[in-house]
Image (tube, rainbow, N blue to C red):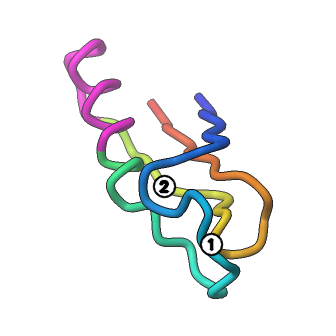
Amino acid sequence: MILGLDECITCAGMPNIGKRICHFEVGLAAGFAESFLSRRVKAYETKCNANGEGTCEVKVEF
């Protein structure tokens, strides 16, 4: 599952700092997925506004 976040809480309006920093959103997505699926998942950030990528994107693997 890939979640696109145009205005995420962590880095909305932030300049390019060359890092992916949206750990909160990754954990939130993982927690929701694990709650609904009743099993462990792997989640990580694949794009970040703060890294100059124009949007934030979280990938959740089941």
The x, y position of residue 47, in whole percent, is 68, 59
Could you tell me which residue is drawn at 64 percent across and 62 percent down? 48
Q: Nearer the viewer, mark 1 or mark 2?
A: 1
In the rendered image, the vertical position of residue 13 relative to residue 16, given as above or below: above
Of residues 62 and 19, the one nearer the viewer is: 19
At label 2, the amino acid type is Tyr
Give the percent coordinates (x, y) of residue 6. 67, 42
Please state if 23 lies on the left or on the right of 50 as rendered: left
Q: Residues within 10 Å of mark 1 (few under 14, many from 20)?
A: many
SS category of the residue bearing label 2: strand
Q: Residue at x 29, y 15 (%)?
A: 37
Name the element at disc 1.
helix
**Which residue lies under the disc numbered 1?**
50
Q: Quadrant of the C terminus?
A: top left
The residue that appears at 26% across and 26% down in the rendered structure is 34
Q: Earlier in the sequence, mark 1 or mark 2?
A: 2
**18 or 44: which is nearer to us?**
18
Residue at the far front in the pictured view = 13
Task: Place residue 35 in its image quadrant.
Answer: top left
Q: Quadrant of the N terminus?
A: top right
* Residue 12 screen position, x and y as percent: 56, 57
What amino acid does circle 1 point to?
Answer: Ala
Q: Quadrant of residue 33?
A: top left
Q: Residue at x 37, y 61 (%)?
A: 23
Which residue, given by chain and number where applicable, does mark 2 sit on?
44
Residue farthest toward the bottom in the current orientation of the protein: 17
Residue 2 located within the stretch drawn in magenta: no
Q: x and y percent of residue 32 in the render?
A: 30, 25
Predominant secondary structure, magenta span: helix
User: From which residue to which does the magenta span run?
Assistant: 28-40
Instruction: Tell me: 1 left or right of 36.
Output: right
Residue 37 covered by magenta stretch: yes
